Image (tube, coloured by chain):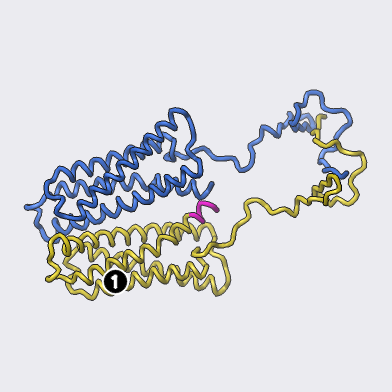
Chain colours: A blue, B yellow
Amino acid sequence: MRVSRPVVHPVEVPPPAAAAGAVAVEVGGAPAAHVENAQPRGVRMKDPPGAPGTPGGLGLRLSQAFFAATALAVMASTDDFPSVSAFCYLVVAVILQCLWSLSLAIVDIYALLVKRSLRHPQAVCIFTIGDGITGTLTLGAACASAGITVLIGNDLNICANNHCASFETATAMAFISWFALAPSCVLNFWSMASS
Amino acid sequence: MRVSRPVVHPVEVPPPAAAAGAVAVEVGGAPAAHVENAQPRGVRMKDPPGAPGTPGGLGLRLSQAFFAATALAVMASTDDFPSVSAFCYLVVAVILQCLWSLSLAIVDIYALLVKRSLRHPQAVCIFTIGDGITGTLTLGAACASAGITVLIGNDLNICANNHCASFETATAMAFISWFALAPSCVLNFWSMASS
């Protein structure tokens, strides 16, 4: 039977206090280097700030939900938004964004309370796809509303007959919500790709 | 001097044909399993279809440039697009998209001709950031133009005085260009994160 040849030649007498399975080497009077205490290769890094299940991630989710809810409230406060399709689309998109971000905020709160990591591959995949879809919808709605707002305010100069300030505020809030979503989406996608 | 204790107790006679540094174990007559011949962990996969430097990647880049150029040509063929800010923004965005995609198409052609891989981390990082910026701009411009087009065509019904068909075509081409860009961006980001 051939066996592996250790680098340090073993002595006949077994070491007195070596635990079973532990590998300890002491050379030239140096303190024992316990291999089982060394950092294993491929160990997972700590969750970066802003990742799901961290206080930063919870803050991002709450920011997204807050700004989306603000956009919804400001747009809904105008009585003529249903006459423009883009504004209706904005309302739908920010409702979806708000629901998604609130749901993930609840998941983050749960993970923080029970001190569990949310780096499960399937969970991260679902978060990434959801962030991608809601982010694209919110950005599209914000851009469409911005196009209409600029048309009304700058190109046609008919702000006197419209709630330009409310439209602009709602559009800005939707953009800020998207800016708060982008780091979550990028972090989740990065986590999914590097796992 | 404490030394490591191997799991299999070493024999006194060294193995006869073990190469220096090689670890060979033969148990129960089974052929020797040479560890140095095993597949190393973390070995790079072949470039996936659509990645930079592949025929699929070149096809995606040419598609992006073609649809962006078509959107530009259709929008520029109307004489009243400068009166709407969103359409001017669309023209700028698709010009940028076309230039970016054509540049990367040339890089892809070069890589294909000299059979070089484009998986260098810095190159992939530049491709990802460029794709992200141009993709966001193109999507935003397409959504803003779509908002205006729907306002003119559906909400106000003033297509008789405007080039609705051209606006719709240009918007659709910009969206298709963005759809062709999305796989490149996702693949580059995935490649950057997993490298």
**Residue B81 position within the rendered picture, expressed as x and y whole percent measured from the top left:** 19, 69
Residue B141 picture quarter: bottom left
Rendered position, B63 above or below B46: below
**Residue B158 position within the rendered picture, expressed as x and y whole percent measured from the top left:** 12, 66
Secondary structure mainly formed by the magenta segment:
helix
In this picture, residue B110 sits left or right of residue B170: right
In this picture, residue B104 sits left or right of residue B119: left
In this picture, residue A4 sits left or right of residue B165: right
Q: Chain of mark 1?
A: B
**Residue A52 position within the rendered picture, expressed as x and y whole percent measured from the top left:** 43, 39
Give the mark count.
1
Rendered position, B85 above or below A161: below
Residue A76 picture quarter: top left
**Residue B36 position within the rendered picture, expressed as x and y whole percent measured from the top left:** 75, 52
Residue at the top extreme of this rendering:
A17
Question: Does the magenta-highlighted stretch encompass residue A93?
Answer: no
- Kind of element beneath mark 1: helix
Residue drawn at (30%, 52%) of the image: A139
Label 1 amino acid?
A: Leu
Residue at the left extreme of this rendering:
A160
Residue drawn at (77%, 26%) of the image: A18
Of residues A88 and A19, the one drawn nearer to the viewer in this rendering: A88
Residue at the right extreme of this rendering:
B13
Residue drawn at (22%, 71%) of the image: B165
Q: Quadrant of the N terminus of chain A?
A: top right
Residue A145 picture quarter: bottom left
Residue range corresponding to the magenta coloring: B190-195
Question: Around disc 1, counting alpha carbons within 10 Å, would you say few (fewer than 14), some (14 to 19), or many (20 or more)?
Answer: many
Q: Which residue is mark 1?
A: B72
